[in-house]
Image (cartoon, grey):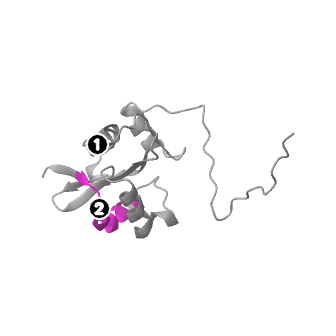
Amino acid sequence: MPITLREMTPEDYDAAYALWQASEGIGLGADDSKKGITRFLARNPGLSFVALEGERLVGAVLCGHDGRRGYIHHLAVAESHRRRGVGRALAAQCLSALKRAGINKCHLFVFARNHPALAFWRTIDWEQRMDLIVMSALTTKARMSQRVAARP
């Protein structure tokens, strides 16, 4: 049966989340709730996709942008469908959609220990940046200085 790609919708959430949970190297958190993913999809219409074999979801990817740069999150393919071009097709679909939106560059995050994912991205010509370090903070715990520097 052929694989088809289409835009991800909130109705795909349960199947996509189950795929992400079953995929090694995908880090899921509170913002990956149905509410969080639905909000992400609404903010980034036409950029996230699923791969289907008939009615069965066999791949999923989240994609969005901040108006300047694109970002890919949670690209996963069912183990039974790997090495068949599904991941490559999902990534290409994201890049095409970003290009149509006027976004010229895309980034993604991969856990350093996720060697299969790193190999996949390198195989499809993504470059690992060695000049950047990712830093994160929770908005609920971020310490923001209340002091304002005195100006002369």
Residue at left 33%, top 68%?
14
**Main SS of the magenta segment?**
helix
Residue type indicated by callout 1 = Gln
In the current view of this chain or complex, which residue is farthest to the left? Answer: 1
Residue at left 58%, top 32%?
130
Residue at left 87%, top 39%?
152
Q: Is residue 21 above or below residue 89?
A: below
- Tag 1 secondary structure: helix
Instruction: State the image coordinates of residue 2 (x, y, percent, origin top left).
Output: 14, 49
Q: Nearer the viewer, residue 66 or 127?
A: 66
Q: Nearer the viewer, residue 108 or 64?
A: 64
Residue occupied by mark 2 = 9
Cβ atoms at labels 2 and 1 below 8 Å apart: no
- Tag 2 secondary structure: loop
Instruction: State the image coordinates of residue 3 (x, y, percent, origin top left).
Output: 18, 50
Residue occupied by mark 1 = 93
Q: Earlier in the sequence, mark 2 or mark 1?
A: 2
Instruction: State the image coordinates of residue 62 (x, y, percent, origin top left).
Output: 38, 52
Residue type indicated by callout 2 = Thr
Q: Which mark is residue 119?
A: none
Confirm whether the magenta stretch covers residue 87: no
For the record, the magenta segment spans 6-21
Confirm whether the magenta stretch covers residue 7: yes
Q: Is residue 83 above or below residue 36?
A: above
